[in-house]
């Protein structure tokens, strides 16, 4: 049984098709990067796996359960794009609160260590730097000791150093047997972290494989060139279909 | 169970540390009571054997409790909903009711703080004297009266945007407080306002509080309690529509 699964999932918002039928399975211990330009449907795919959106057609499951079910929630952690997090709670209080939602959370000290928050656990959230804030959100995602992490653009807006620090935390989670689905438009990030890359464009999967395979497919030296080539091809195909 | 307790504890700490909330909710009713209740305190209410300081304790108590509930719910939910935090919580295994129960508990807790301080002012500087049982009944009634305004705040917070919510709350809260006779005694208000007041939940709330002081009130207490229950149901219904609409728009 895959840890997370989308099969034949479409999602329409009124006239707009956010997802045009995608199938995707995430296995245990695997880190899959959903890569694509803005508006490709990455966030929609994550929201469906979080039970925050229902597929228009098709089927989604987390550990074989409905993604909105309590069983699925208890085995899953998420880091979402959020404009404002309550600033007048301390780091420790934020973590203790989210830990209380789970049945078997990690001990507080372990969460703090795994997210790299040692020494700042008594600071108010509003007093933290951007990188520290993002690590707190990461701590909230892992504090319940979940088997699956869904990370929606976890390093967006971070400087290189903070980004690499968060990568190390994500790798640590996978090393302990966790599965991760992350969305990104940083190609370097997919290359550095992912076992498998799924390239989305206009709500469809246009390429899938290891970072090496993706690069090899287009005879590109870097993932960035490969990405642009793949997305470019899919645009041409889309135009041909339209005509 | 632990999740409910932690949610309430964190909600209280979070709210208490927000000066914009804690200072304005606590300070404004106390300040107004000083201006109107204490400054003119020894004057008798026209036609009643009751000093102003005594009478206005009930109305400014109602005013303070309403503010605590309306800002915590109306502004709190609009901001957390509009800026994505509520969604992070909804993706987590948080029991959905915990979020709303915590906000209600904190609203009532702040209501109780306002009432305690207001009563202290009234007793120390306004010369208000009552039997202990009456103080307690009055305090308990005022704090519990915050609940319909939690529902009103929830309705506002389910529709208002994060930036417009404070203004929306003020536009409803302050005129309603005035027209219900919470700032100036009801009998001082123009006839037209007096006739329209039964359409305001704040009016029924203050009439209940005044009845405990044995001040003359309009209509039966049972009727006012019934009216508040009906308002609560209507506000909860409006909030439910807002939450459903939101879910359909965003979660489809």
Image (cartoon, grey):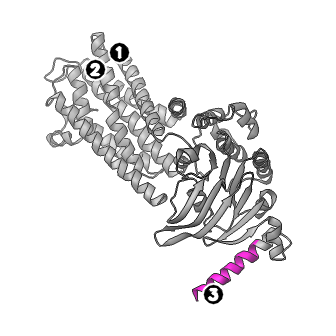
Q: Give the image quarter of residue A190.
A: bottom right
Position in image of residue A115 (x %, y %): 73, 41
Q: Chain of mark 2?
A: B
Q: For the magenta stretch, what is the residue range?
A: A227-243
Q: CA distance from mark 2 to mark 1?
A: 9 Å
Pointer 2 or 1: first along the chain = 2
Q: Give the number of the disc on residue A240.
A: 3
Q: Residue at x 21, y 42 (%)?
A: B199
Viewer-nearest of discs 3 and 2: 3
Task: Say left or right for B218 vs B2.
Answer: left
Residue A142 visible in the current orientation: yes
Label pair 3/1, CB-CB below 8 angstroms: no
Give me the chain letter of mark 1.
B
Taking the image as shown, residue A105 lies to the left or right of residue B137, namely right
Which residue is disc 2 drawn over?
B53
**Mark 3 to mark 1: distance in Å?**
83 Å
Left or right: B16 as drawn, with respect to B25 = right
The residue under the point 62% across, 35% down is: A99
**Mark 3 and mark 2 on one chain:** no
């Amino acid at each position: 049984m895959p840890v997370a699964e989308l099969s034949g999932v479409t999602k329409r918002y009124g006239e707009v098709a956010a997802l045009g039928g995608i199938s995707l399975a995430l296995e245990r211990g695997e880190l899959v990067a959903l890569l694509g330009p803005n508006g490709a449907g990455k966030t929609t795919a994550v929201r469906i796996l979080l039970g925050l959106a229902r597929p228009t057609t098709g089927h989604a499951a987390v550990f074989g359960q409905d993604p909105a079910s309590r069983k699925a929630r208890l085995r899953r952690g998420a880091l979402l794009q959020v404009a404002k997090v309550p600033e007048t709670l301390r780091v420790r209080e934020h973590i203790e609160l989210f830990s209380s939602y789970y049945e078997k959370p990690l001990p507080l000290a372990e969460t703090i260590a795994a997210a790299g928050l040692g020494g700042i656990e008594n600071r108010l959230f509003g007093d933290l730097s951007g990188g520290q804030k993002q690590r707190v959100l990461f701590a909230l995602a892992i504090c319940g000791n979940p088997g699956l992490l869904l990370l929606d653009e976890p390093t967006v807006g971070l400087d290189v150093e903070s980004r690499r620090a968060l990568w190390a935390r994500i790798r640590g989670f996978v090393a302990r047997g966790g599965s991760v689905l992350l969305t990104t438009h940083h190609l370097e990030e997919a290359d550095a972290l992912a076992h498998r890359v799924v390239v989305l464009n206009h709500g469809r999967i246009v390429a899938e494989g290891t970072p090496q395979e993706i690069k090899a497919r287009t005879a590109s030296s870097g993932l960035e060139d490969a990405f642009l080539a793949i997305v470019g091809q899919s645009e041409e195909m889309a135009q041909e279909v339209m005509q | 169970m632990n999740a409910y307790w932690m949610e309430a504890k964190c909600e209280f700490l979070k709210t208490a540390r927000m000066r914009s909330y804690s200072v304005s909710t606590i300070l404004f009713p106390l300040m107004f009571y000083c201006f109107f209740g204490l400054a003119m305190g020894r004057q008798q209410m026209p036609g009643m054997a009751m000093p102003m300081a005594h009478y206005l304790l009930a109305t400014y108590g109602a005013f303070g409790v309403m503010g605590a509930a309306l800002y915590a719910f109306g502004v709190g939910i609009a901001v957390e909903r509009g800026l994505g935090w509520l969604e992070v919580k909804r993706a987590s295994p948080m029991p959905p009711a915990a979020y709303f129960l915590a906000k209600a508990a904190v609203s009532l807790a702040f209501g109780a703080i306002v009432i305690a301080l207001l009563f202290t002012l009234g007793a120390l500087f306004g010369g208000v004297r009552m039997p202990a049982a009456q103080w307690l009944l009055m305090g308990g009634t005022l704090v519990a009266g915050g609940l319909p305004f939690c529902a009103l705040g929830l309705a506002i917070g389910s529709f208002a945007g994060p930036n417009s919510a404070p203004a929306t709350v003020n536009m409803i809260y302050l005129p309603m407080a005035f027209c219900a006779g919470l700032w100036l005694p009801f009998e001082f208000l123009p006839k037209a306002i007096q006739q329209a007041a039964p359409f305001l939940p704040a009016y029924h709330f203050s009439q209940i509080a005044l009845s405990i002081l044995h001040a003359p009130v309009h209509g039966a207490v049972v009727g006012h309690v019934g009216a508040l229950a009906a308002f609560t149901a209507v506000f909860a219904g409006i909030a439910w529509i807002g939450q459903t609409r939101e879910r359909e728009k965003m979660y489809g």
